[in-house]
Amino acid sequence: MGRFREASDDESETAIDMSPLIDCVFILLIFFIVTTVFVEETGVEVDKPQAASASDLEKNSILLAITSEGDVVYDKKNIGTAGVQGVVGPLIQQEPEMPVIIQPDKDARIEVLVRVIDEAKLAGATKVNLATAR
């Protein structure tokens, strides 16, 4: 009988404390939420022209769309060609190397496209690209 001990209160202290594990999981969750890059779409569907030399561009960029009617759209809002500098300028000041990607409809007028490119460059953009289909 001396070899066997009766269960005592010491066994209740051997339980695993889950609170540090939960803290670590929440810290990781917050880290991934903060470091995730969200890409803002333009909000309109455009039929992009085909290009053989199409390549993938950076995820963090300013997306502008030109519809077949000649509307310039940013973040689901029609900003027109006059609003390009007002949108692109502050974003370029925050991150000077951020590219401007223009998504023109294949039926969009060339005059509107050239004006949007010119307005983006006047706002300080150094990288202006056209989105095409492969």
Image: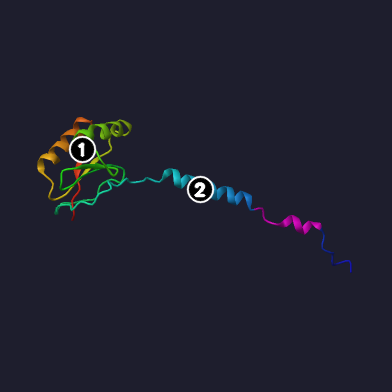
- Element under disc 2: helix
Residue 60 image label:
none
Q: Nearer the viewer, residue 92 or 86?
A: 86
Report the colour scheme: rainbow
Q: Nearer the viewer, mark 2 or mark 1?
A: 1
Image coordinates for residue 100, horizontal then vertical, percent:
24, 40
- Does residue 125 appear in the picture of this structure? no
Q: Residue 122 occupies which quadrant of the picture?
A: top left
What range is drawn magenta here? Answer: 9-17
Check residue 12 for magenta coloring: yes
Image coordinates for residue 38, horizontal then vertical, percent:
36, 46
Give the residue pinned by disc 2.
28
Left or right: 30, with 111 as reference point: right
Q: Residue 123 occupies which quadrant of the picture?
A: top left
Q: How many marks?
A: 2
- Element under disc 1: loop
Left or right: 81, with 76 as reference point: left
- Does residue 31 appear in the picture of this structure? yes
Image coordinates for residue 22, horizontal then vertical, percent:
59, 51
Q: Earlier in the sequence, mark 2 or mark 1?
A: 2
**Label 1: few (<14), some (14–19) or many (≥20) C-alpha neighbours in 10 Å:** some
Above/below status of 60 relative to 4: above
Give the residue pinned by disc 1.
80
The amino acid at mark 2 is: Leu
**Label 2: few (<14), some (14–19) or many (≥20) C-alpha neighbours in 10 Å:** few
Q: Residue at x 40, y 46 (%)?
A: 36
Left or right: 93, with 18 as reference point: left
Q: Are marks 2 and 1 in contact (CB under 8 Å)?
A: no
**Quarter of the figure that contains the N terminus:** bottom right
The amino acid at mark 1 is: Gly
